[in-house]
Amino acid sequence: MKRKINTKIKRRDKKQEYDLDGIPSSSRKMKCFKKRRQQNRIRTTIFQMHSLLKFCSIIAMLWLCSRLMICKYWYLPQNTFDAYPNNHIRIIGNKITPNDKIIAALKRHPIPKKPIYLVNTTPYEDEIEKLSPVKKAFVRRYWLPTRFEVTIEEEIPVITISPSPTAPEIAALTSKGRVIDKEYLPIDHKKYNTFKILTYDDFNEWTSEEIYHLSVLAQRIEDYSGENLVYLDIRNKNDVFAQIETIKIRIGELNSTLKERIERLSSVIPQIRDLNLERQTEYVDLRWDNTTYLKKKSKTSAITEPKPPEDYKQNAEEKKAEHSVSENKKQDAAKHQDKKESLKPEKPQPKQETKPSQKPAAQTKPTSQKQAEPKPLPNIDIQIVEP
């Protein structure tokens, strides 16, 4: 066994190679391995430093973001809705709805103590959309400064309602039948191209088709007459009137011949202007199919306006009842004072004889007789009717 081991060692020694410098190749390899280890260690330390810096920077960024999220500039002041205008609220697109009505609607929902990016805007939009002229409301949130921007999309009114020519308008209606309340009136008729309608009917029950037909009728009167419509009186649907800028028009019944009768205005109104009959004419009568009549003005003749129904009378009667109650209270107070004065001693006075009072006879009102309308004459454009 000894001989064999020694022979192996000798063979290894014989196989060992030498470089040109006389240094064995194994030692050179060891030096290369050591250099590589050092380089790997340096690289690992650099990588660890980079990762540590990244981790620290991420923590710093998260801390800064958390501080920014909590800072006071994200919160709306609690007195934002107390006064308008201010830097924290802006209202756009409202022409009929006043700003104070929108602010009052916003006040119904209090401002939450949250950052503005967490505030839910749908309750504010719902409160604004409860206002009758508002069709759609949008509330947007902005930062620096923290504010609300309220964008309003309003309904477009088509007609306005009034009980008489001199009375103020009580409501406005859109094409879909939505009622705009009295508190948002009056409306600029030229700006919205609306028409004034006189009626005693319950306009809340009107359909969109009825509103459309009335607006078309009013537009046709303006187109064929060439003048702006002041009002359209449909209080008596069997005898409809229309007032334009210079003259009154008696349309009559709204039947199948309405369109043809309205088209006659394009030839009648210029003839009246040429003859200077505007001041002398009470109204233009379009009730007949073949002829147009002009009714002359007079001191005695006057158009009787239709009487309002009982619903309109009830409010007047309630006011009268309140007035009578206040007068009764005054009379009771005066009687109470008279009783106090009567308790004082007074000198006797001679009695006076009282005569029975006679009630005046009731006056009878003269009965008005209806005048027969003239018969239409064919092949004549205008016939002047004397009063």
Image (cartoon, rainbow, N blue to C red):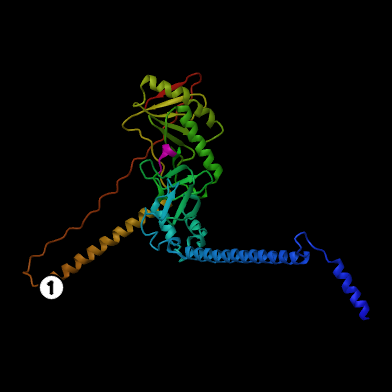
Is residue 82 at all visible to an observer of this figure?
yes
Front-most of 364 and 133?
133
Q: Position of residue 53 (x, y in %)?
A: 56, 64
Image coordinates of residue 186 in percent, x first then y, are: 39, 45
Q: Which residue is mark 1?
A: 343
Left or right, 373 with respect to 335, comes to: right
| Nearer the observer, 244 or 381 | 244
For residue 315, what is the image quadrant?
Answer: bottom left
Q: Is residue 382 magenta?
A: no
Residue at figure coordinates x 92%, y 81% from the top left: 2
Q: Quadrant of the N terminus?
A: bottom right
Magenta residues: mostly which secondary structure? Answer: helix
Pointer 1 local density, CA inside 10 Å: few below 14, some 14–19, many at least 20: few
**Residue at left offset 45%, top offset 61%:** 74
Residue situated in front as seen by the camera: 345 or 363: 345
Amino acid type, residue under disc 1 in the picture: Leu
Above or below, 226 relative to 114: above
Image: 315 above or below 186: below
Q: Quadrant of the C terminus?
A: top left
Q: Position of residue 105 (x, y in %)?
A: 44, 58
Magenta extent: 187-191
**Percent position of residue 78, x then y:** 40, 63
Q: Residue furthest bottom?
A: 1
Q: Please state if 195 lies on the left or on the right of 52 as rendered.
A: left
